[in-house]
Amino acid sequence: MAPTHVDWRKSSHSGHNGGDCVEVARLDAGVGLRDSKNPAAGHLTVPPAAFAALLARVKRDEPTA
């Protein structure tokens, strides 16, 4: 069953030019991830620990400015 109200948040690194954007939301079953350009396509739900590991990996591999 889909949640009735979910607060999706777009990455602060996403630009406003219509590029690749990811949205995340805290769900009962874990963390939801979806494409902000096509939210009707659904979302992927991952356990909180898996999402934390993903963030750690992304931050570790992030190029410095």
Image (cartoon, rainbow, N blue to C red):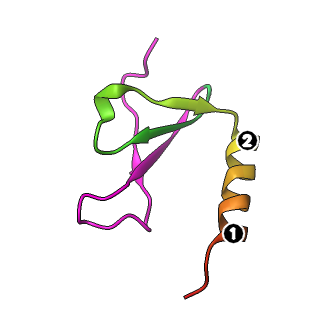
Q: Quadrant of the C terminus?
A: bottom right
In the picture shown, does residue 48 fall above or below 3?
Answer: below
> Of helix, strand and loop, which one carries label 2?
helix
Q: Position of residue 60 (x, y in %)?
A: 73, 69
Q: Position of residue 26 (x, y in %)?
A: 54, 39
Of the two numbered discs 2 and 1 in the rendering, the one whose residue sits closer to the viewer: 1
| Quadrant in the rendering for residue 15 | bottom left
Circle 2 crowding by C-alpha within 10 Å: few under 14, some 14–19, many from 20: few
Q: Does the magenta stretch mainly form a helix, a strand or a loop?
A: loop
What residue is shown with label 2? 50
State yes or no: discs 2 and 1 in contact (Cβ < 8 Å).
no
Numbered badge on residue 61:
1
Give the residue at the far top of this rendering. Answer: 1
* Residue name at image x 34 percent, y 27 percent: 41
Q: Which residues are magenta?
A: 1-28
Amino acid at pointer 2? Ala
Q: Could you give the CA–CA distance between mark 2 and mark 1, rounded to whole angstroms?
A: 17 Å
Amino acid at pointer 1? Asp
